Amino acid sequence: MVKLGQSSFRRILLSRILLLSVPVLLVGEYVTYRKARSTLLETARLNLTESAVRKAETIEQWSKSLKSNLIGASENSMLQSVEPKDYQKFIAQLGQRLPAQVDCLQLTNVQTNQVIASTCGQQPIQSLPPKFWPPVQQQQTLLDEKSVYISLSWPLQRQGKASSKKVASGAEDFPDASKEARDSQVSLVLSAPVYTRRGNTRQLSYALSLQSALPVQTSAPKGSLAGYTVAIDQDGTILAHPNINRVGRNIDAEADADRLKSILRRAMAGGQAFLHLFSFERNGVELLAGYAAIPSPSTRKENSKWIILAVSRLDYALSGLEEIQQVLFNLIVGLVAASIIATLYLSRDLARPLEKLRDYAQTVDTAEAPLAVPENFQIREFNQLSEALNSMVQRLRSWAGELEIATKEAQVANQLKNEFLGNISHELRTPLNGIIGFIQIVRDGYCDDRDEEMEFLQRAHDSSMQLLNIINDILDIAKIESGTFSLMLEVVDITQVLEDAIDLQAAQIEEKGLKLNLPPPHDPIIVHADPEKLKQVFLNVLSNAVKFTESGSISISVRLEARTNSGSFNGSGPENALAQPSERIGNNTQSDWVVVTIKDTGIGIDPEQQQKLFQPFVMADGSTTRKFGGNGLGLAISRRIMESMIGSITLHSAGVDQGTAVMISLPVNQQSSFYFHSPDLAKEKETFKSYE
């Protein structure tokens, strides 16, 4: 029931939105305008600074090019071979080959100061200095830039009485490429000596001179960020300006003299930046100038520089603001209209996101559930709620997936342990039955003589040792799994430990008729290791090689490798890439490692099964009826032993019936021996590393 004083939701919403949105939009428009202006201004400053640098580089390259061309022309052999009457033709041809910026080219007799040949009349463009060049050129002496005499030609000097001609004060009135623009700028006049051969000497005869106006830009159209060019020497004399009447004046006579002097100081110090000029133009227009300095092309004095300015009117640099203002006005009108329209739909739009999230939450565990949580709402809180709901659903799914994986892993582990129990019962029963049988035969007196009795006792002893080895393996893996495995590290010769292990397996190798390829005699290689555990690793690998090789050979090699920071070995051979030690020793960038490779020609291993062999209870053939026997613990124990000694063991086989190679690696040249015992193997390794 409607009560007095109450208003509709839509009316309240409309009034509140308009009261809040319109001022906010106006403030936003102002802030945007100021930001756009500051961005355009910063862009203009950077562009004018870069333009000044480019203009300075252009003038510097122009000066060097003029000097290079003039020196090359003065040493042209044509000046030596043609007759004096043909000099005019040579000068005309030379003028066509030189850059277009060269306004005049003259050949002058240095003795009489008479113009011999010219492209711009007979009036000398430069008064030649007396005794500037040596009268005789030394043999094998080439001209360089120091041989070029340089002077400045001012536009008012060239025009003479014509200097009273009116020149517009605005930069935009001077097209860059016109003759008028070049005549309104200072020109560089360069002269180089021409030596001609007289007898056995080369004597100074002529001076080759050229005149070229500064390659400056005298116009800066609206919107251009290149700016027009102003050049000032280090004494403050204006060398180039769009207004000819200001060329040759000193900046002390300018209204903005202090700011111009500031530019000179900064540029002379190597600065490349920008500055605002407020009174450089007669009409008071604010200017923006970027500046850079170059070595003076007109003098050989050290630290003499020209300052090149790229100048643009501030309103020209910010001409894009007019379009931005129009866009902002249209935008504010559109936003106000859109706010009114949006208010009409807001009541429905506020409820719709909640309905979508509710529907998803109610159907997430059903077949009708959408694939993803609804998102991309216009209201931040709804998006946050959507993200939270999505995160919760993802966590639940992740936990379900992890639980499923853990269940499968537990099933696999249970299956492996069941297989292991079946295998180990077979492995335990076989030697135990043998022991019982041999002892019963001896006890019951069925032996014919003492030798046969000793033979049965020896077999019982061998079976008991086999049984003891199986029990030791089980105890070792139990200690490893519980973290109570211990080592006694000491300085040992790994080659001697290897020889001891080979001696223990020599009888079995000979019994199977296998060929044993041993490494050549090697100097002792000292490592820090537990000799008994290291021998156990060698015996495990050798035993497997003998067990799984029916015929062929077993090859053993020992080599030293250099290990780098990347953890790789700097060696060669296909097995080199497999010998990747799992740990580093200290912070050494490179250390020596010894790598023992035991390679057989046996049954090989499927590549997909190779990584599994280092897991406890896993064999390539897991059934109790397998042909070769074993308990699946040897390689797992060997890997943990090697890792505890900061070494590694890796295995590689090209495939079934392709043989197997096992690489055992240890660092050499360690410095101490000690015994450690820790319930945590990871902590044991960390302790070893920190001790080193």
Image (cartoon, rainbow, N blue to C red):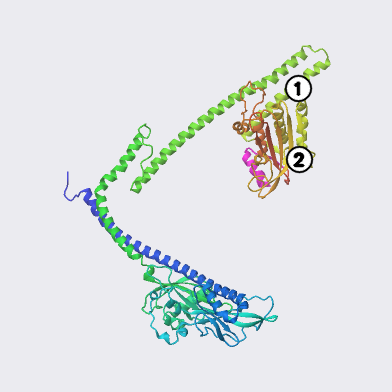
Quickly name the residue at label 1. Answer: 461
Looking at this view, name the residue that lies furthest to the right. Answer: 450
Residue ID at (43%, 77%):
181
Q: Position of residue 523 (x, y in %)?
A: 79, 42
Quickly name the residue at label 2. Answer: 492
- Mark 2: few/some/many CA within 10 Å (<14, 14-19, 20+): some
Residue 353 lies left or right of residue 565; in this view the side is: left
In the rendered image, the quadrant that contains the N terminus is: top left
Disc 1/disc 2 C-alpha distance (Å): 31 Å
Residue 320 lies left or right of residue 146; in this view the side is: left
> Measured along the vertical axis of the image, is residue 98 above or below residue 155?
above
Task: Compare marks 1 and 2 and give the one earlier in the sequence.
Answer: 1
Give whichever of 265, 217 is nearer the camera.
Answer: 217
Q: Is any part of residue 190 visible from this angle? A: no
Element marked by disc 2: strand
- Residue 370 in which image quadrant: top left
Element marked by disc 1: helix
Residue 329 lies left or right of residue 189; in this view the side is: left
Amino acid under disc 2: Val
Q: Position of residue 348 (x, y in %)?
A: 26, 44
Is residue 681 covered in magenta? yes
Q: Position of residue 413 (x, y in %)?
A: 56, 28
The part of the chain drawn in magenta is: 674-692
Amino acid under disc 1: His
Q: Position of residue 257 (x, y in %)?
A: 44, 80
> Measured along the vertical axis of the image, is residue 25 above or below residue 464?
below
Residue ID at (77%, 17%):
456
